[in-house]
Image (spheres, grey):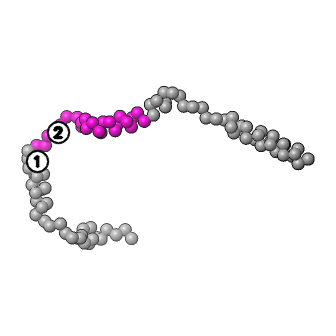
Amino acid sequence: MNMKKASWALVLGCLFTAPLTAVAQEPAPAAATEDFGADTRAWLNLQASNNATMGGSRPMPGEIADQVFARYAKSFTHPIPEYFEREKFVEGGGSSQ
């Protein structure tokens, strides 16, 4: 009797799991797997080759270049503070609490 119950349990177990194993995912088409990562490889190769350009050069007019350099040079006239005081750095304290 126990053997009969065990065999029925086995048959029922196979019947319930059969649909799960029968619904297998079909493999991806060959074209999709061959191209996988092609865009990423192209971007990495472009970066590594250092051939990426932003188009035509945009020269800076002399007057603006002089102003930029003057501002840069002036930034060295003030010592870098050891720490920044919050009240002086942000008007009104900047607290959101």
Instruction: State which tag comes first along the sequence, 1 or 2.
Output: 2
- Vertical relation: 88 (above or below) 74: below
What residue span does the magenta drawing correspond to?
Answer: 37-61
Instruction: Give the Cα separation between the discs numbered 1 and 2.
Output: 12 Å
Quadrant of the drawing holding the C terminus: bottom left
The percent coordinates of residue 51 (x first, y second) are: 25, 35
Residue at the location (88% across, 44% down)?
4
Q: Label for residue 58?
A: 2
**For the residue carrying disc 2, how many other residues have a C-alpha within 10 Å: few (<14), some (14-19), or many (20+)?**
few
- Vertical relation: 82 (above or below) 10: below
Residue at the location (13% across, 43% down)?
60
**Three-letter amino acid code at the position of disc 1:** Ala
**For the residue carrying disc 1, how many other residues have a C-alpha within 10 Å: few (<14), some (14-19), or many (20+)?**
few
Q: Residue furthest right?
A: 1
Mark 1 sits on what residue? 65
The percent coordinates of residue 71 (x first, y second) are: 12, 56
Residue at the location (11% across, 47% down)?
64
The image quadrant of residue 61 is top left
Q: Secondary structure at mark 2?
A: loop
The image quadrant of residue 15 is top right
**Three-letter amino acid code at the position of disc 2:** Arg
Q: Secondary structure at mark 1?
A: helix
Is residue 27 within the magenta segment? no
> Depth check: 74 or 79 in front?
79
